[in-house]
Amino acid sequence: MPSAPTSLPFSETFAHPGDPLPAHLERVAQRAEASIAPTARAEARAIAFVAGLFHDLGKATPWFQAYLLHAGRRSALTHHAELGALLLWWYTAALDWPLWQRLAAFIAVRRHHGALTFQDWPALFEQTRAEWQDPESPLHRQLAVLDVAGIHAWLTDLGVRYPGLSQAPEPLTLEHVEARLRDRQAGGSKLRRAFGSLDEALAMLAGFGALLAVDKTDAALQGGRIARQVLPAEAVMRYKERYLVPAAVSHPHPNPSPSRERGSLTPLAPAGRGAGGEGRAIPLNHRREHIASNVTQTWLANLDHPLLTLTAPTGAGKTLTVLHAALQARAALEARDAEAPRIIYCLPFTSVIDQNHAVFRAVLRANQIADREDLLLKHHHLAETRFRTEDAEYQPDGADQLLTETWQSELVVTTFHQLLHSLLSPRNANLKRAGQLTGAIVLLDEVQALPLRYWEALRQLLMASARTLGTRFVLLTATRPLIFQPGDAVELLPDHDSHFRAMTRTRLHAHQRDPLTLDDFAERLTADLRQDARPTLIILNRRRAVRRLFEALRDTLPERPLVALSTDLTPLDRRARIRLIQRLLRQGEPVIAVTTQLVEAGVDFSFPVVHRDLAPLDAVIQAAGRCNRHGENGAQPGEVHLWQLQDAKSDGQTGESLWRRVYDAALIEVTSHTLATAQSWDECDFLELTQRYFLGCRARQDQQRVDEQLAQGDLIGVEGAFQLIEEQLRVSLFVARKPADHRIWEQYRRLRDDPRLSPAEQEAGFRPFKCAFYERVIQVHARAALGLERDLLHRLDASEETYDREAGFIGLPGDEPTCIL
């Protein structure tokens, strides 16, 4: 065996070029601890701090220093995480820590450059203990050449300056390290029982996430950090005073305005309103103001209650109402605790994030607050990652993406997927947000969209996060799903029942008992639309059905404005279709919109007539929320018609219902049973209907307890079991329709085909145009793209036989498709 290199003085080692290792470790430890809110459990802060002190301590070996400073070779001896974790285990034996906390800090250091891909919490420690049995292992060789005296002196000095650390750690020797590894107090059975609850698992993830976020941003910003910012508590009220109230008085038929976005407290009445609309709008706006006032007062009166719900009818202005209340609560908490909680606003789908983000941006602009991502951040997998502060704009070189993905902002608009995978995932890329959840105010909008099989796990996760992380949660809904049990949460609108009972905007007509083929429905609808020029929204369950009905209506009603909307259109074209529909509605045109259910989660449409293919009742209620949303019809309720549409076979026989392969049969059965007692239902009945529906669903739906898997440390199992989006056989197609699209594709192709670039370099080159690229990508079922590989991305040149802007994907070209990448 070659002789060991000479030890280097610990005080002269570096974490990164120009960044001394002792200073880096202490800085990261301080910032990781500070990034965890004081309302979180003290153990989470301690894990973050001590893990920060040890995370890069393994870099003190001469092998790593040669690699870092002199372009040395990488080898097992340059690895640093396992050595740092081993030293942490030795050190924490002297601290008054329970075994689970020691194990949590060990895991945080051991995997701060990797994923938590294991099936129980002790797995990594057992691996290290097994490796130590080999006296020739890299761990033995690394420890033998450390400046143990210098490290011991550094730790002793830290113990004097920081309460909670050991002021007189035992000498750092091979014998003492080995004794701590073999300690009977950390035997196998004790290790397996170390983590006793979900609370401890979440404390571990928070400390780990804080370490990840701080360490990565410290490196990316070369020791810098993003400063916290001020959000005015009265921002929403100033926005209303400037844009909404005066406009509602003097401009009943406005031009497009941010005030027409979802959630307006006193929205402007759209053009084309029916007779009596003026009188109908006044009490609705007054009701919205009453709701907004009650919500804020109730929240401030229950400031220390971490679990809240807001139940209000669709169109009641929940979005801005809860933003105003959250800003008020944030200000009160900051005044009391000297730290302002971040506000994290979560939605089920990316399709409505842009809309909500635009509303929030308009609120900040009304307060003379510039567009900056350290104040307002949009984060989902397709979002642009530009990050701006008052002093700098971070270009797409890695720092911008990192700052976005670690939520370095005061107000974050994101998806359920990003939020929940911050805890329910083994992946470093997701878990680095876990620390940002501590002390945060998390607003979950349209929470009923979460699959029912996860509701009990979600309940346990939210309650444990409130206890352990100090997080506050508000569940916003118009259907009051039974996620919380009585006594769990405080309702922010205690008199919500009275608001539902007073609502008369819509009437639901239940026709689903008599199934119709899609062709028969098209004939019936055509006959009705020839006699009725009112704008009409038709929501179907399948993209193929949207195209078929769109083409049928286009042929039979050529004089009517007709718009199709589904995910067969690229995201770029979908947004254009939504804007077109909104413009036609404002202009009072008799538009017919044929869409999939993507419009149900908050897209700001208001039609006098809505048709809905059979779906679970909560989706039907959301569809009804696109009908007469602002009371434009006056005393006449809007019409919502529920149908059960079916395919027709080639032999003329009836095929399967179009809800199949989209929704769970049990949910449809409960919906049919709930609606079976009457032919029609008024809006005032909707809350009672949904309560009966959810009770029936809970009785039939098995629960997927991913919370129990997380508590046990089965992160591999969590990743497999927690799927917000069902895995389907899909093929990704880049739609090239215009010259700009072809240029983006060529830029992508050159990048991916360049053999000189590493995957990391390719990713860095792709990042500046990633958002523009994916705005042109659709996913189609594998059956519609036979011959194309699922794991590759393919180019689809738009033509009359492949893709049209009216309804999107048609099919592959007739000749053999060419796979580009």
Image: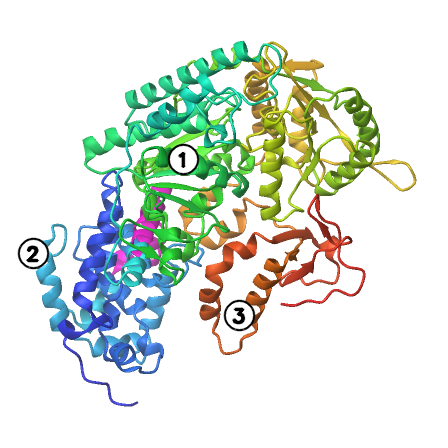
Q: How is the image coloured?
A: rainbow
Looking at marks 2 and 1 on the same chain, the residue that comes earlier in the sequence is marked by 2
The answer to whether residue 411 is left or right of residue 12 is right
- Residue furthest right in the image: 651
* Left or right: 360 as drawn, with respect to 677: left
The span shown in magenta is 182-211
Q: In the image, what residue occupies the spot 23% across and 50% down?
A: 33
* Label 2 vs label 1, nearer the camera: 1
Q: Residue at x 76, y 22 (%)?
A: 513
Observer-side mark, 1 or 3, equals 1
Identify the image quadrant of the N terminus: bottom left
Q: CA distance from mark 2 to mark 3?
A: 53 Å
Residue 171 visible, this angle = no
Residue 243 in view in this figure: yes
Neighbourhood count class around disc 1 (C-alpha, 10 Å): few under 14, some 14–19, many 20 upward: many
Q: Quadrant of the C terminus?
A: bottom right
Q: Position of residue 131 (x, y in %)?
A: 35, 72
* The stretch drawn in magenta includes residue 516: no
CA neighbours of label 2 inside 10 A, class few (<14), some (14 to 19), many (20+): few
Q: Residue 703: percent from the left, percent from the top?
A: 54, 37
Q: Which mark is residue 362?
A: 1
Report the residue marked by disc 2: 160
Q: Tell me which amino acid carries mark 1.
A: Ala
Residue 97, numbered label: none
Indicate the amino acid at tag 2. Val
Distance, label 1 to label 3, CA atoms, is 37 Å
SS for dot 3: helix
Between marks 2 and 1, how big is the CA–CA gap?
Answer: 50 Å
* Residue 751 disc label: 3
Query: What crowding class fits label 3: few (fewer than 14 Cα within 10 Å), some (14-19), or many (20 or more)?
Result: some
Return the residue nearer the eye: 428 or 129. Answer: 428
Q: Quadrant of residue 239?
A: top left
